[in-house]
Image (tube, rainbow, N blue to C red):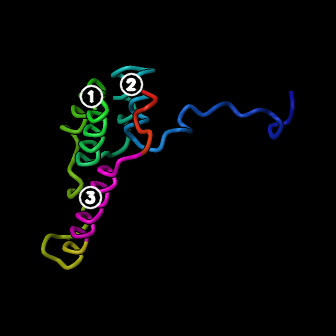
Amino acid sequence: MPPPELRPEAPDPFEDFERADEIIAFVHRKYGDEGVRHCFSEGIFYRERLEEIVLDLCAVGLKKPAAVVAEIAAKSPIEASACPYREGTANYVSWMRSLKWKQQTRRDKRLTPRPGYGSQR
């Protein structure tokens, strides 16, 4: 057997994906609803981000994986619940402003058309 540096790498099925909705579409196609649920079975996923993924999936007509992600989103905490500061403090206000800015930035990026998006579905 050749040394590790000379062995060909196994192809990475996720290499061509840039966004979460693309990965979820791939996983759903290959592993179905349970595969999508498994993707979100560990860790913390905030409702707002999952709802964005649902919108992206619906935008390209992938309603089945969108329904699974929507089901997961409904049970997920909101992002603001992760704030480590007491309400009313300066740190709390700053953290919430930052959160709103991040959410708006993600929303703006999501609404920007991407060339060729959805052409391989």
Residue 111 lies in the magenta stretch: yes
Q: Residues within 10 Å of mark 1 (few under 14, many from 20)?
A: some
Q: Which residue is mark 1?
A: 68
Image position, residue 30 (x, y; %)? 45, 21
Q: Which stretch is magenta? A: 95-114
Task: Please tell me whether mark 1 sits on a helix, a strand or a loop.
Answer: helix
Q: Quadrant of residue 21?
A: top left
Query: Label 3 is placed on what type of residue?
Result: Gln
Which disc is residue 28 wearing? 2
Does label 3 or label 2 sit earlier along the sequence?
2
Q: Main secondary structure of the magenta part?
A: helix
Q: Which residue is mark 3?
A: 103
Q: Residue at x 29, y 28 (%)?
A: 61
Q: Is residue 78 left or right of residue 22?
A: left
Find the residue positioned furthest to the left: 88
Q: Is residue 50 left or right of residue 24?
A: left
Q: Residues within 10 Å of mark 3 (few under 14, many from 20)?
A: some
